[in-house]
Image (cartoon, rainbow, N blue to C red):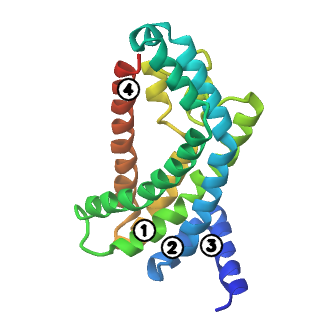
Amino acid sequence: MNFLDHFQNFLNRFQGIFFNPKLTLKALSEKPVWVDAIIILLIILTIFSFIIAPYLQKDQLQVIKDNVVRQERMGEEAYNRQLEFLESKLYFFIIIIGSIITNLIGFFFPTLIILAMSRMFSTEGNYKQTLSVYIHASFVDKILGNAVRLILILTRKSVTQMTTSLAFLFPKLETTSTGYIVLSQVDFFQLWLFGILGYGLSSVFKIEIKKALIISYGFWFLKSILYIALGLLGRQFGG
């Protein structure tokens, strides 16, 4: 198969995730492929990070500058060094590299957890099959979801309070508030992702869709609880 055939095959899978996810994920469970999908996703996510990095830098600088208590606690010299670092090109590239590493972990590690959770219902399926359906279902959030988020960031010229979750309905909530931290986990594109993932898991593990959705949304719930806990913990030490 030449490059054009590979690319056409990828495009068929891409549009299938949005318009015929059940059959697309069933086919991927029977003949798992993932290398081309993860390469394209990483390229798109790197471009996304590159575009939003200046806005993220600006927002983080503003947070530090507005935190008088932090300035007094650190001392003027250390405080100025931190500002200088946040404004540097080095920090810009740390954001990009950090994004690549985070996304790689975000593809491979959740697959392992989902596979482990599946063993409550089935002995069928393997890691490669699970990885294939998970990465392709991620098109919903990583490509379409981030496209919407990018529009919001470019419109507002800020990453702060940029969200496609329920928190979007409450613009007056502080990003460090408990309400915002909780609501930000109920993201429309994440719910869509884990909904269609159920089709793939049902095919991979040879189980009924109801059980597959328990695995899929069960993982989403556990992930959300972890992120909420980390958000609340970060608030305690972020001052």
SS of the residue under disc 2: loop
For disc 3, the marked residue is 13
Residue at image x 47%, y 60%? Answer: 197
With 51 as the anchor, is 31 left or right in this view? left
Disc 1 from disc 4: Cα separation = 30 Å
Quarter of the image containing the C terminus?
Answer: top left
Q: Looking at the picture, how far across and down is residue 191, in whole percent?
A: 51, 46
Q: Looking at the picture, how far across and down is residue 236, in whole percent?
A: 34, 19
* Amino acid marked by disc 3: Arg
Residue found at the very far bottom of the displayed protein: 1
Residue at image x 61%, y 31%? Answer: 87
Disc 2 from disc 1: Cα separation = 7 Å
For marks 4 and 2, give the one nearer the viewer: 4
Between disc 2 and disc 1, whose residue precedes?
2
For disc 4, the marked residue is 234
For disc 1, the marked residue is 131
Disc 4 from disc 2: Cα separation = 34 Å
For disc 2, the marked residue is 34
* Amino acid marked by disc 1: Leu
Q: Residues within 10 Å of mark 4 (few under 14, many from 20)?
A: few
Between disc 3 and disc 4, whose residue precedes?
3
Between disc 1 and disc 3, whose residue precedes?
3
Q: Are marks 1 and 4 in contact (CB under 8 Å)?
A: no
Q: For this rendering, which residue is in front, 162 or 92?
A: 92
Disc 1 from disc 3: Cα separation = 15 Å
Residue at image x 74%, y 40%? Answer: 151
With 122 as the anchor, is 224 left or right in this view? right
SS of the residue under disc 3: helix
